[in-house]
Image (tube, coloured by chain):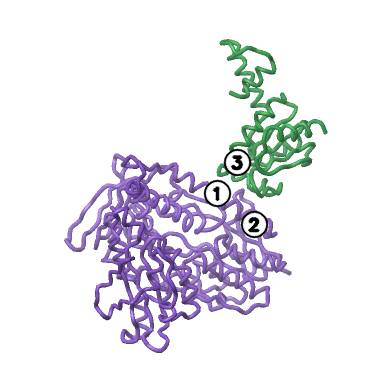
Chain colours: A purple, B green
Amino acid sequence: GKNEYDLLVIGGGSGGLACAKEAAQFGRKVAVVDYVEPSPQGTTWGLGGTCVNVGCIPKKLMHQAALLGSALKDAQHYGWNISQPVHHTWSVMAQGVQNYVKSLNWGHRVQLQEKKVKYFNIKGSFSDPHTVRGLTKAGKETVVTADNIVIATGGRPKYPMDVAGALEYGITSDDLFWLKESPGKTIPLLMSDVSLECAGFLTGIGLDTTVMMRSVPLRGFDQAKKTISFTTQQQMASLVTEHMESYGTKFLKRCFPTKVEKLKSNRLQVTWKNADLDTEETDSFDTVMWAVGRAPNTKTLNLETVGVKTNSETGKIIVDASEATSVPHIYAVGDITEGRPELTPTAIAAGKLLAQRLFGQSSELMDYDNVPTTVFTPLEYGCVGLSEEAAVQRHGSDNIEVYHAYYKPLEFTVAERDATQCYMKMVCLREREQRILGLHFIGPNAGEVIQGFALGIKCGATYPQMMKTVGIHPTCAEEVTKLHITKRSGLDATVTGC
Amino acid sequence: MAQRLALQRLLSVPARGSLASHGRAFGTSAGRRSTFNVQDGSDFQDRVVNSPKPVVVDFHAQWCGPCKILGPRLEKLVSKLEGKVLMAKVDIDDHTDLAIEYEVSAVPTVLAMKNGDVVDKFVGIKDEDQLEAFLKKLIGA
């Protein structure tokens, strides 16, 4: 028979909602199914996906809470009479953040209603290539049929399978942002963007925090991340973690956990192997948080029944440049897709473009090149384009020039803050017009700084053009327009302001 | 507290020891009778849609600042009317489908309902005079 909907989107996150709302604009009959499987610790949340509920949004707000703590310390130097030490109350921050997230859940619900997108809060799974069924919370079975289906179910944090007690006693980022009470002395394991960002703000609000890492800075933990991520940036990673160490975060290097046990005091005892000293060590914590990567949400979809192919290693759905899966009318966008960045803006853009191609006579494909990103550690790292390593691999070290500088933000001076790790580098082709291949910035407001330069890189900006761009004074960003010391020269890259 | 004093003023009962405690019980139960939290869809059907008396429905949310001001303000004025109007409170996070069904988008949204129909509505915060006029219209009409 005829299918009930033109489009069914499975997953109400960044990619799914963007796709559904765009399709509805074309007057199509669209439905969205969304469901949040409670975490092993029982945490659950509303409509909006990872970004809204357990990702970007709460992360950035808690990062801000930590930055404000630093600002309070700096404030004394600027004349403010603030009695030290300043204390932080987790529950006040958590309530503010959680309330804001709930307002976003509601906002998304209203938007779907206003755009006439039908919403079902069910855990959908395929029963045939055009049919998805699931149970509502009340236990009623709902069946949805559609001409086109987009899978956008995202991912969830992984638990290590080789550490006893990991599942029973550990939490993940899914739980951290919804805690009503302070996590106390916490150990985020292991080294990843997530663990560093979390460790960063936990330290910033005054909590005893230790990050454990298997090896010295970063080996790629996520092979699927094809865009140049934090993990391929040896130099940048060292600078960021060095800053965190001076800031108070503890690092256990070349260690890996073996078990987690609960003590009589209800605290948790973590045992780990120290590879350098070849010893076994333990310590007790209030909270053990796993950040060992994310797994795609495909297990309960029943993909095998309909023939949607996934990558055997990562489990993610294989798609082509038009986000099509191995089944003609089934597509996928966002974190669930193989080889794509795990980012909200790319999921949203891909979702919108997909809807435009399906229903709006467009043929524009998503451009995954030169996607800017930022890691919101206490000293932020923002980047766009190629890493130094990737540029060398692609063009050869003789054909690229790396300009770099260690700079000091003006605001750090009066506050007597250490700027040792404030650094930037620009990777350019050496010949012809000297096109800029990548830009990397460590410093305050890195995301704000990099965003504008991303446009330049998209337009094929060159080194001479950058040098002709006048800087805004006094800012950190202006130092980008003044980069002139090359790594090749071996000269001291410290630059001063006025 | 405000409800008890308001009720005592209406009844001209002095706020003395024993009378005060008597007044408190009376004030609270009258307040409790005229304002209630909606439990679920069928509770809304029973106590709001099928209510013989007109009902103001206050759609609010935990995360909504203005709701925390409007709620008590409206509650106070409703209790002054001694049961002529009832007030139903709906937390939109707990009862999302119900809120969507009644086309709530921003909060606070207050509906005036009579015989199961929405006869009046406002969105956002209002002062006491505006609320009194709103309630008067609901009873009077």
Q: Which residue is mark 2?
A: A111
> Disc 2 is attached to a residue of which chain?
A
Circle 1: element type: helix
Circle 2: element type: helix
Question: What residue is shown at x 61% (from left), y 50% (from top)?
Answer: A139
Circle 3: element type: helix
Q: Which residue is mark 3?
A: B66
Callout 3, which amino acid? Pro
Is A402 displayed left or right of A451 in the figure? left
Q: Nearer the viewer, residue A295 or B89?
A: B89
Residue A469 image point, x, y percent? 44, 75
Frontmost of labels 3 and 1 is 3
Frontmost of labels 3 and 2 is 3
Quarter occupied by the C terminus of chain B: top right
Query: Residue A422 falls in which quadrant of the image?
Result: bottom left
Question: What residue is shown at x 42% (from left), y 86% (from top)?
Answer: A433
Question: What residue is shown at x 64% (from left), y 42% (from top)?
Answer: B108
Residue B78 image point, x, y percent? 69, 29
Query: Which of the labelled discs sits on residue A102, or is there none?
Result: 1
Residue B63 image point, x, y percent? 55, 44
Q: Nearer the viewer, residue B112 or A78?
A: A78
> Disc 3 is attached to a residue of which chain?
B
**Separation of marks 3 and 2 at Cα, in angstroms:** 21 Å
Q: Is residue B85 above or below residue A205?
A: above
Q: Earlier in the sequence, mark 2 or mark 1?
A: 1
Residue A409 image point, x, y percent? 35, 61
**Separation of marks 3 and 1 at Cα, in angstroms:** 16 Å
Task: Using the rendered image of the protein, determine whether residue B47 is visible from the camera's viewpoint.
Answer: no
